[in-house]
Structures are given as structure tokens and as C-alpha cells.
Amino acid sequence: MKPVKVGLLGLGTVGSGTLNVLTRNAEEIARRAGREIRISHAAAKHYDPTGLLGLDQVEVCDDAFAVVENPEVDIVVELIGGYSPARELVLKAIENGKHVVTANKALIAIHGNEIFAAAREKGVTVAFEAAVAGGIPIIKALREGLSANRIEWVAGIINGTGNFILTEMLAGRDFDDVLAEAQALGYAEADPTFDVEGIDAAHKLTIIASIAFGIPLQFDRTYTEGISKIESQDVSYAGELGYRIKHLGITKRTDAGIELRVHPTLIPERRLIANVDGVMNAVLVKGDAVGPTLYYGAGAGSEPTASAVVADIVDIARALTCDPENRVPHLAFQPDEMADLPILDMEQVETAYYLRMQVEDQPGVMARIATVLADAGISIEAIKQKEPEQGEGRLPLVMLTHRVLEKQMNSAIAEIEALASVNGQVTRIRVEPLAG
């Protein structure tokens, strides 16, 4: 049987890892796929050949479109990232009847509906396991391993940079200090916005929700909130209350619609996912038949991500002799069965809350705040009131509430911030038990 020839777009961190894994494990991969798989062509404007295995067997050029147009290439692997020219390259590959593998979560989250429609029309596959959670096979788990289940909810630590920052803040370090270290270590870009403001996680959550619930990709409906406003005192107070703060992507099926949200979240410290530290990722899935299952591993890195890329290549190689109609659908559900389920506005979401505020050290303050919350239908679960520093007339007040609609909490916070005895803004972090 003739070998499967791969055209690799990009020889950066993930591209280099993909070449090395395919070359180093060529015999094992061929046994799994039923035929030889090799990278025959690659496109890269700039790359470091040091440590690249099998590069002498690859025809390298600087024109990605030349690789996409090459009739010898069976599978195009897009690892250049971004929206353009990635979108144009992927669509051209599909137009030419080539299968595609990509690690580009932004491309799939924003342009996936268009790309998958084009792929169905041409009878080719677009695989994207590496686009979510790096080396963790969460896409295959949702799309295939859990296909017997009605997925109830998914919650994940799906950005390693944010998780590293929050982990280091447990030691009392400030956000800015840890961010600078993350940048020095290569965990965060010079412009860290996508990581610390939740955009990267929102891209990934958009994909997860589509596969979990059979809905179109809807990145623009994903509520997104970052971790840049979290202070070390919040991490400390959460610990005193028995919680850890994690930056989560959460999607839930409710009677009213689908929740789709990324934000800092308090999790009971006894939960396994609350103890996932550093740059590691973890995704917790609740299915009606299997119950809660946890998927843990490296969410980024050269060879962990390459592991997912190569797994997709192997899947396509196995399926090359199959009738396209019998392949696993791109988003797990048949296209004509995609559900028209509404995505909930954040104000319709119900959670518990952690609230922290600076208040004047005077009688009646607590009573006024409690009255505002009670009038909004919000009950308090726990309160921590710290003693003021010597000579200070203000003190921090921390409380946990029971579950309530976000709309009610927004209204209550606005009233609390308007009180003369409350200084500045109220810090609000949502709380999720994540119990089975």
C-alpha cells in the first residue's frame, strides 16, 4: 500500500515536534495506521534545522500555497496559526480534495462552520484534536468515547498560562510579578492578552461546546472574562474558605439553553481539578451515563501538541479507504441534526458568588450590605471580616453567597458600590461546586 504523504505548513514549535514524532516513531505509527506516513513537503519562511529528524527527506519551500497545490500531498497539516492566510490555505486544500489537520483553535472557533461545510461538500476530513488542550485527547473523548452519553456539562482549565499565574499567586505573589516570569519562561507572549483575558480559552470552549451539544460554533456568544483583576488577597481568602481559584471554561446544558462562559471560578479545594497546577490542563466532563470523567495532561508544548496532530493524521490515514459518509462527523453530530439551542446571556446564568469589598470600619455597614443582598433575593453562606490595619479606617469584607441569577447579582453589586460606606468596586468571582 502506498505511503500517505503529508504536507506540513509551519516548522515552528509544533511543526518541529510533529516532524520529530512522525520520524522517530515511524515504524510504530505505520503499524497503527496500516500504512507508512511521512512528511514529504513542508513550507516555512524561517526555521531552525537543529534537532529536526528526517529533514533531509522533506522538500522544504517558503510558499505554503505551493504545498497545498502539490498533487503528491494527501494531507495538509496547518500549523502556522492565526486567521489569515490559514483560512485561505485550509479552504484551498479542501478545494483541492485534500484532508486537513490543524492545531489552530482561533481558526476553527471563528471560521469552523464555513470550513466544515466546505469539507463536507468535497468529502474530505478536517481534524483538529490539537486545537484544544494540547496533548489531551478531549476532542476524541467527546466525539467518540462519550458518544453514548447526553453531555450535561464540561468545565476545563484550558489555558496553561493562566493556570501557571494563579498557581504561583498561591504563594502570595502579585499578578504582574508572575506574568513577567511567565513571559520570561516562554509560557506567555509579549502581548499576553489572549491568555490572561480569556480569549484563548474562549476559542477552545467554543469548540468543546459545539462537540458536546451538537450546536454550531458560536465564539461571539461566549462570555469572556480574564484573570488580570485577581489579586493575591483573593487567592488567600479563597483558601481560607476552602476554595481554589481557577480560570475555567464552562459550558452547560440547561432547560433554557446553553451556558457558554470563561471566567475565574472558585472551586472546592477537595476537587481533583482544583489541584491541577502550573501549566497543566484538565477537562472535567459530566455525562448522564458515565458520570464525571477527568482528562489531564500537557496543554501545550512541542511534542505534547504534536502527539495530537499525529493522532489526527493516523485517523485520516485509517479512513482513506472508507466511504466519506461513514466517517465520524467533524462536530460529532450529523450536520442536518445540529441543534438550534439558544446560547444564554450571562445575566441568565445562575451560580454562587465570592464577593470582596473595602468598607468603612463603622457600625451598621454589614447590616446595610446584607439588606441590599436580601432585597435582591440573595442569601449569604459565609462571611469573613478582617481587622483593619493600625490607623486604617477601612477593612476588607469577604462573603460567599448561595446560587442566584447573574442579573440579580449585577443589580445588587451596583447598589452596594453606591453605598457611602463601600470604597471602590466590588470584586466578584463566580463559584462552581463541579460535583458529579
Image (tube, helix red, strand yellow):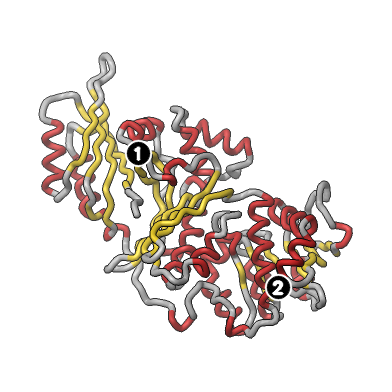
The mark nearer the N terminus, 2 or 1, is 1
10 Å crowding of disc 1: few (<14), some (14-19), many (20+): many
Kind of element beneath mark 2: helix
Q: Report which residue position mark 1 lands on.
A: 243
Residue 182 position, x and y percent, is 57, 37
Question: Could you tell me which residue is drawn at 32 percent across and 46 percent down?
Answer: 431
Residue 83 position, x and y percent, is 60, 63
Q: Nearer the viewer, residue 258 or 224?
A: 258
Three-letter code for the amino acid on which mark 2 is drawn: Ala
Q: Horizontal placement of 80 versus 73: left or right?
A: left
Three-letter code for the amino acid on which mark 1 is drawn: Tyr
Up/down of 87 relative to 416, above or below: below
Up/down of 423 relative to 411, above or below: above
Which quarter of the figure has residue 423?
top left
C-alpha gap between disc 2 and disc 1: 46 Å
Q: Horizontal placement of 46 versus 132: left or right?
A: right
Kind of element beneath mark 1: strand
Residue 261 position, x and y percent, is 39, 57
Question: Could you tell me which residue is drawn at 31 percent across and 68 percent down?
Answer: 257
Tag count: 2
Q: Report which residue position mark 2 lands on.
A: 317
Residue 317 position, x and y percent, is 70, 73
- Quadrant that contains the N terminus: bottom right
Which quarter of the figure has residue 426?
top left
- The answer to whether residue 422 is visible is yes
Spot the residue most to the right. 56
Question: Could you tell me which residue is drawn at 65 percent across and 66 percent down?
Answer: 312
Question: Could you tell me which residue is drawn at 43 percent across and 81 percent down?
Answer: 337
10 Å crowding of disc 2: few (<14), some (14-19), many (20+): many
Q: In the rendering, which numbered label is found on residue 322?
A: none
